[in-house]
Image (cartoon, helix red, strand yellow):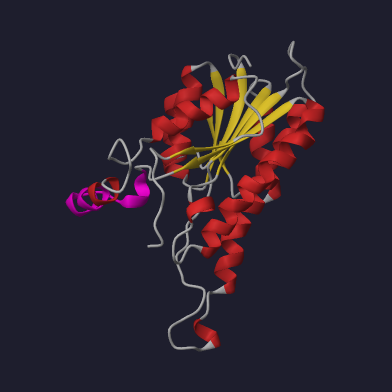
Amino acid sequence: MDLNDTSAVVTGGASGLGAATARLLAQHGVAVVVADLQDDKGEALAKEVGGVYVHCDVTKTDQIINAVDTALGMAPLRSLVCCAGIGSAQRTVGKDGEYSSAFDLDNYKLVLAINLIGTFDCIRIAATAMGRGSADEDGQRGAIVLTASVAAEDGQIGQAAYSSSKGGIVGMTLPVARDLSAIGVRVNTILPGLIDTPIYGEGEASEAFKAQLGAQVLFPKRLGHADEFATLALEMLRNSYFNAESVRLDAGIRMQPR
């Protein structure tokens, strides 16, 4: 699929995986809407790549619509990359046997609301807009890349909420791809492993921690780079025969229980 002179919405686009993807798409002639909650970083990145920043909470449908409409105002919308998400770490039950120390149900609901429901809301809104556009010679009107995690398959202790949300993304990839085939929109999902993003912080202690994590990786023994995620996302968008797949990007790691 030709991406030149088209537009894209990248959620969670102000930093990490989303920022790397926004930069790479811009290098390939795409007008990018950086959709995020980090206003300062989002504005700066949008200026850098010649795109537009839109403040977007993926739990708010009206804000998703605003991001999509902004992209449509720039060029035909052909791409959506969903990188917005949060983590969570808490065991299902506490050590004291009290009901009150069991997993915080509100936190569980929040993780699913952002990671899973927010992703689906972005899909349904963006795909609706894509479906109004003209099709290419293959009948394509767009492509969507979702971000899950190896935790969808290798969830660790304390990751019940996070793994549930990411497993849900993997689980909906095929049925949503089947749904959207009717309008010529492809859907694929990336399951990143240990990727070096701002979540690990900065400084000497952070670097030592990342080196320790990298030693667990099969090969190469390091954390992944955000631009390695971006290149796979780009391939999923451009390659017309890439559809309904969930692909691990993890250098062969298999996460242990803890």
The structure residue drawn at horizontal position 29% and vertical position 50%, both measured from the top left corner, is: 213
Q: Main secondary structure of the magenta part?
A: helix
Q: Residue furthest top?
A: 137
Using residue 207 as the reference point, say whether residue 71 is left or right of it: right
The structure residue drawn at horizontal position 74% and vertical position 14%, both measured from the top left corner, is: 138
In the image, residue 70 lies at what x, y percent? Answer: 65, 32
Relative to the observer, which residue lies in front, 183 or 20?
A: 183
Relative to the observer, which residue lies in front, 221 or 121?
A: 221
The structure residue drawn at horizontal position 54% and vertical position 45%, both measured from the top left corner, is: 148
Q: Quadrant of the N terminus?
A: top right
Using residue 172 as the reference point, say whether residue 148 is left or right of it: left
Q: Residue 15, can we see it?
A: no
| Vertical arrangement, residue 60 with respect to residue 179, above or below | below
Using residue 152 as the reference point, say whether residue 201 is left or right of it: left
In the image, residue 67 lies at what x, y percent? Answer: 64, 37
| Vertical arrangement, residue 211 with respect to residue 32, above or below | below
Task: Tell me the magenta residue range.
Answer: 197-210
Q: Residue furthest left?
A: 204
In the image, residue 171 lies at what x, y percent? Answer: 66, 48
Say if the magenta span includes residue 87: no
Q: Quadrant of the C terminus?
A: bottom left
Using residue 164 as the reference point, say whether residue 257 is left or right of it: left
The structure residue drawn at horizontal position 50% and vertical position 16%, both measured from the top left corner, is: 28
Relative to the observer, which residue lies in front, 225 or 66?
A: 225
